[in-house]
Amino acid sequence: MTNRTLTALAIRFAALLLFMKIFDQFGFYFLSIYYTALMPVLENQLHTSLDKFYYNGTFLLLGNFLISGILFFKAEWVSSKLIKVDSDITIGLTPEKLIRVILLTTGITWLAYSVYLLPDLYDYIQMMIAKANHLGFAKKVDFSPIYYILKTTIAFLFVFRVEKISSYLEKKMNRSEVRQDKNN
């Protein structure tokens, strides 16, 4: 496998994820149109006209569909523009490289999950501010800020300190192997 092929594969995967996001937008967009049609009072309360809302939603939906289609069907062309020199990918799997892959994958997954939970963090902060100011409209939010902060911090450590952590774990593994050899 070459680096250009791998890039094209990653672009196709990103396009599929973007295409799947269309269904979220589609459901939200048409549900909001339905509720807006049921409540004509809303137009008096909004500062912008509803036509702008409909046009923006339609534009985002069509733009997302177009971009995901281009990325999926023209992935080789995009990867050829991004990767100028095509070279073979060789992987020499060592324990240290395996540890790095595991740490990076875990760190990136946890960071993505942290980004996914940002709206919940925002709701939690609003709830805490409302409670601190003794306002009665604070809604209950099921969110653990300590777990969120801890997991995000560890994810940043995994991503940015992967070499130090993997070399430390490699030394620990080598020491335990040496001890086992001495005991045998």
Image (cartoon, grey):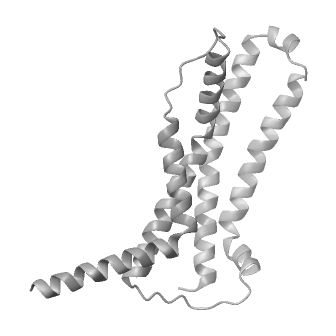
85 or 68, which lies in front? 85
Measured as percent of width and height from the top left, residue 141 is found at 53, 24
87 or 179, which lies in front? 179
Measured as percent of width and height from the top left, residue 139 is found at 58, 17
36 or 148, which lies in front? 148
Measured as percent of width and height from the top left, residue 112 is found at 57, 52
Q: Residue at x 61, y 66 (%)?
A: 12
Instruction: Specify the quadrant that holds the C terminus.
Output: bottom left
Q: Residue at x 54, y 45 (%)?
A: 149
Measured as percent of width and height from the top left, residue 57 is found at 78, 36
Q: Residue furthest left?
A: 184
36 or 157, which lies in front? 157
Vertical arrangement, residue 175 with respect to residue 11, above or below? below
Q: Residue at x 37, y 79 (%)?
A: 170
Vertical arrangement, residue 77 with respect to residue 60, above or below? below
Left/right of residue 108 with respect to residue 99 in the rendered view: right
Q: Residue furthest right?
A: 48
Q: Residue at x 59, y 54 (%)?
A: 17
Say which quarter of the image contains residue 130. Answer: top right
Q: Tell me how many marks there are.
A: 0
Say which quarter of the image contains residue 99. Answer: bottom left
Vertical arrangement, residue 29 with respect to residue 8, above or below? above
Left/right of residue 50 with respect to residue 163 in the rendered view: right
